[in-house]
């Protein structure tokens, strides 16, 4: 009963924060500079984690200077909030999200690049768009698994968007996401969003679970060094696996 009450309070506060974010991007963002918008997005994500009782831990250092491609394992819808809270970046996402009420406005205002997954030719366009964004100095984040997993393993990495880093001659920084229970150190299954999970059900499970820690392990940024996109994708997956298995202390 107490968990339900806590979760309900978190849900109300989080919903208000989301609506406040929607109002901010509609009314204030046009008058802000790009760095100001980036700081606002990061602060908004950090506040949402606080409201929902999720502790953010970062191990290592996020890429700070110039363009980069961030590659990460993918566990939950919460990954995007955690990564935005860690450092501002532009995500590549399926085009459906652009049309979601409220969420679509927030995603677009945060600089999301959209891909139409059902059109094979759109992947080529996206590689060019991501490459151009990095040539313009942007930091782009992708989930090369292409879908979420249960957090216990990392699926094979698709290599398409790694091609964008090669074209832009930009570094790629691998990182590993983990969600653990603070008191046990065990994997927090509640945040997973896989198989038959619904978004509402996943959100509710997350808000009912006390002591969730979102842990971000940052690896070292790396260059292609003569690798083709497939070999680089394989090496990046191996590094994400290594980072995921590191102890936080």
Image (spheres, helix red, strand yellow):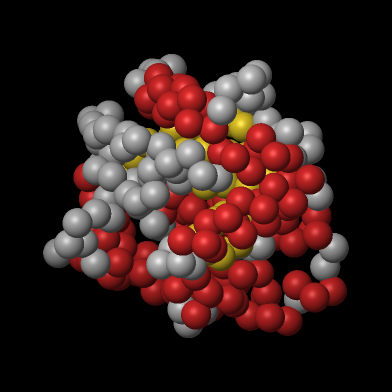
Q: Is residue 107 visible?
A: yes
Q: Height in image: 151 above or below 108?
A: above
Q: Position of residue 87 (x, y in %)?
A: 63, 44
Could you tell me which quadrant the N terminus lies in? bottom left
Q: Nearer the viewer, residue 70 or 60?
A: 70
Residue at image x 78%, y 38%?
A: 66
Q: Height in image: 152 above or below 91?
A: above
State the count of labels. Answer: 0
Residue at image x 73%, y 81%?
A: 27
Q: Nearer the viewer, residue 117 or 211?
A: 117
Q: Position of residue 7 (x, y in %)?
A: 29, 64
Q: Position of residue 192 (x, y in %)?
A: 27, 50
Residue at image x 53%, y 74%?
A: 98
Could you tell me which quadrant the C terminus lies in? top left
Asked if residue 73 lies left or right of residue 1, the reply is: right
Asked if residue 31 lies left or right of residue 199, the reply is: right
Farthest residue in the front direction?
Answer: 121
Q: Nearer the viewer, residue 130 or 209?
A: 130
The image quarter in which residue 67 lies: top right
């Amino acid at each position: 009963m107490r968990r339900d009450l806590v979760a309900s309070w978190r849900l109300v506060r989080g919903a208000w924060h989301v609506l406040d974010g929607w109002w901010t991007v509609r009314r204030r963002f046009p008058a802000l500079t790009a760095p100001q918008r980036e700081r606002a997005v990061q602060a908004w994500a950090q506040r949402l984690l606080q409201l929902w009782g999720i502790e953010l831990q970062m191990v290592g250092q996020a890429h700070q200077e110039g363009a980069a491609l961030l590659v990460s394992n993918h566990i939950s819808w919460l990954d995007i909030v955690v990564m935005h809270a860690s450092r501002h970046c532009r995500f590549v996402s399926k085009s459906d999200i652009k049309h979601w009420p409220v969420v679509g406005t927030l995603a677009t205002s945060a600089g999301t690049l959209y891909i139409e997954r059902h059109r094979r030719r759109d992947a080529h366009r996206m590689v060019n768009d991501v490459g151009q964004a990095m040539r313009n100095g942007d930091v782009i984040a992708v989930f090369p698994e292409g879908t979420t997993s249960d957090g216990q393993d990392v699926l094979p990495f698709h290599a398409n968007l790694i091609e964008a880093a090669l074209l832009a001659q930009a570094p790629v920084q691998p990182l590993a996401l983990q969600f653990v229970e603070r008191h046990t150190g065990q994997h927090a299954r509640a945040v997973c969003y896989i198989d038959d999970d619904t978004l509402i059900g996943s959100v509710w499970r997350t808000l009912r679970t006390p002591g969730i820690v979102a842990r971000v392990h940052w690896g070292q940024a790396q260059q292609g060094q003569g690798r083709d996109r497939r070999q680089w994708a394989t090496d990046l997956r191996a590094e994400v696996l290594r980072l995921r298995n590191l102890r936080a202390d």
